[in-house]
Image (spheres, rainbow, N blue to C red):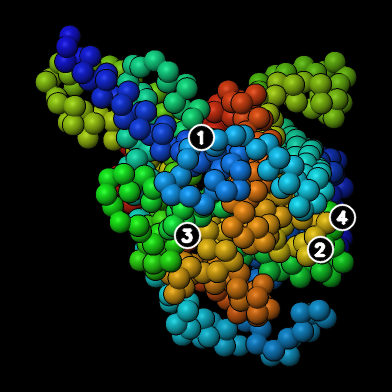
Amino acid sequence: MRKRILHKTIIYLFLLIGAIFILLPFAWMISTSLKPSNEVLIMPPKWIPSKLVWENYKIAFRSAPFKRYFINSIFVAAMVTIGELITTILAAFAFSRIKFKGRDILFSILIATMMVPSEVLIIPNFVTLSKLGWIDSYKALIIPWCASIYAIFLLRQYFLGIPEQLYYSAKIDGCSDIKFLWLIMVPLAKPALITLAILKIIGSWNSFMWPLIVTNSEHMRTLPVALSAFSSEAGTDYNILMAAATMNIIPVFIIYLILQKHIVAGVSRTGIKG
Amino acid sequence: MKKPAIIQKISNIKEVKAFIYLLPALLIITVFQIYPIVKSLAMSFYTDFDYLTDEVYRRGLDNFQYVLTDPDFYLALKNTFIFVLGAVPLSIIVSLGFALLLNSNIKLKNFFRSVYFIPFITSTVAVSIVWRWMFNKEFGMVNSILMIFGVEKINWLTNPKMTIPMLVLLNVWKGMGYKIIIFLAGLQNIDERYYLAAKIDGASIWRRFTSVTVPLLSPTLFFVSITSVIGSFKIFDEVFVLYDKQTGPLKSGLTIVYYIFNKFNRYWQFSIASAAAFVLFIIILVFTLIQLRVGQKKTNY
């Protein structure tokens, strides 16, 4: 019995050390973001500021057009997610329910292209976008990301799990394909769709290299690009910089707190399917 | 010439229907994913061209020759390989360790799992900025903690020898939660009875781990190792932000993708960047194939 208690204690101890290792950077970020300027650069550092300077957030927010960046990031994430869901639902339906010639070949080609690292695609895509005159526009930030082979693959698997009989009985009742898809398949596939939506929102919110490359004017920047630029400008005003970083993280963190269960379920599902 | 055949094929009602459903996705995927693969390969052979008009005056192997003889590219290869070699095994060991701890019958399981997952959802840019401040030599939190133990101040960000270890640490920290969740899902699929049987046979904890857990977890281990290798080969954001748009002290953080990015974005050498991107693709492909090969032999499904 005593051995067992010792055993448990060691496990908790390790888990606790792990949690501290994970949370320490966030604690340091938030602590710095609330410090008065004269307490930022002192050694040894104070973990709890002598007074909480919420003003830092205001200063950070005003020192760059962060409102604009927030709107850009939210708009892009929303459009990309809606776009991907629409194209994915339609394509997954075709791949799972309509038997057309060349279906398997087409599907294999798509799966094979998933192997190519996205870095390979960036250069030709940049050229294509500049030819279309889309550089530095929402179109460049949104349209290329409105379809994903991975998402189609995942949803197709899910659709395949929905019994075929449902489709035929709906057909006999005179239900059209699009109606069946919208009224029956989509509600049934809700867990998979929620997973895809969440992963897309988080991915879009945090994506960096692509927005960095296709935007050049300040008002088109998304939050990560703006934050990266801001971090070079802020110099040693670490309290302001940490306030900006915190602002960047908070929206996704709130989404995470609300949708935690779905995210965890989604990740374990997508992981195993691989 | 081909048109009549296509029309004939499409005349089949099912094909028309499928085509309509597939159109939005295929349009975007073709333009932004399939065409660029072909184009990128073609571009890597352009030696004299005008990208705006897309006129090519000369083709050849010059770009590949340039890349494969460029000392910077070798440095990038070296740095990336060392990073992959460090980050992949370490992050798998750490994550598997925590997954095993979490899988034992304990309370607060969900709490710990949620905490470990937080870095994964947060932006690499924001996180890298925070790390830059944490590891600040004079006023950073890490040195101040080490000071308590009497350790001298360490040049985390300006010593070239520290660059790859820093990136590995950041990578382990960021990816732990994701891998833990996947490992946990895999562990939950292992039938309890195998452990009971092993226990009855008197197998030690270590023996149970190597003879039951590892073989039965091998599909998951396999999936995680392939995706981590691919992901690690593409490291870029962390370096770019951690070293403030530089490649680290003495280019110690110059990675393959950073090399591609520099050629493309800083010097506008599109065709050289394309050639380098293709070399990256080949490397990833070879590694994935090797892993698939090994996996087929070693994995128990």
Mark 1–mark 2 Cα distance, whole angstroms, equals 39 Å
Q: Amino acid at mark 4?
A: Ile
Mark 4–mark 3 Cα distance, whole angstroms, equals 44 Å
Q: Nearer the viewer, mark 3 or mark 1?
A: 1
Quadrant that contains the N terminus of chain B: bottom right
Report the front residue among A236 and B142.
Answer: A236
Q: Nearer the viewer, mark 1 or mark 2?
A: 1
Mark 3–mark 2 Cα distance, whole angstroms, equals 30 Å
**What residue is shown with label 2?**
A217
Q: Amino acid at mark 3?
A: Phe
Q: Upstream in the sequence, badge 4 or badge 3?
A: 4
Question: SS at mark 2?
Answer: loop
Mark 3–mark 1 Cα distance, whole angstroms, equals 39 Å
Q: Upstream in the sequence, badge 1 or badge 2?
A: 1
Report the front residue among A35 and B135.
Answer: A35
Q: Is residue A70 left or right of residue B62?
A: right
CB atoms at circles 1 and 2 under 8 Å apart? no
Asked which quadrant contains residue B105, the reply is top left
Q: Which mark is residue B7?
A: 4
Q: Is residue B236 visible?
A: no
